[in-house]
Amino acid sequence: MGFEILLIQAKKGNETAVMEIVEMYKPLLVKNAIVGGVLDEDLYQELVKVLLSCIKQYRVIK
């Protein structure tokens, strides 16, 4: 499934599509949640919340 279709499905509330996008971005989220060489779980959760917010706000233009 292409990313655009996946994003549209996630915006419609498809939990599987949302989880697939979160898994796709997980390495980047983890990388940015490492503070002092240790994974900050709270920061990771905040970054996931920001990603979910971005999915909801993103406008798909065709």
Image (cartoon, rainbow, N blue to C red):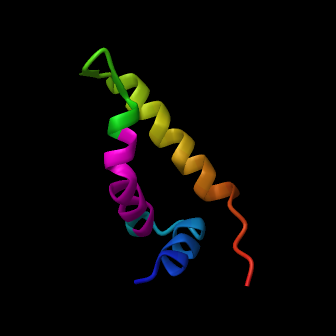
The image quarter containing residue 28 is top left
Residue 5 on the magenta span: no
Residue 52: x %, y % from top left:
54, 50
Residue 26: x %, y % from top left:
34, 49
In percent of the image, x 40 and y 83: which residue is there?
1
Asked if 61 appears above or below 34 in the picture, the reply is: below
Residue 19: x %, y % from top left:
37, 59
Asked if 21 appears above or below 46 in the picture, the reply is: below
Asked if 37 appears above or below 26 in the picture, the reply is: above
Residue 47: x %, y % from top left:
48, 36
Name the one closer to the observer, 13 or 22.
22
Q: Specify the segment rendered in magenta.
A: 17-29
In percent of the image, x 45 and y 61: which residue is there?
18
Query: What secondary structure characterizes most of the magenta part?
Result: helix
Of the 4 image quadrants, the one containing the C terminus is: bottom right
Left or right placement of residue 58 versus residue 28 in this view: right
Name the one closer to the observer, 28 or 22.
28
Residue lying farthest top? 36
Left or right placement of residue 39 versus residue 19 in this view: left
Name the one closer to the observer, 51 or 33.
33
In percent of the image, x 54 and y 70: which residue is there?
7
Asked if 2 appears above or below 17 in the picture, the reply is: below
The image quarter containing residue 61 is bottom right
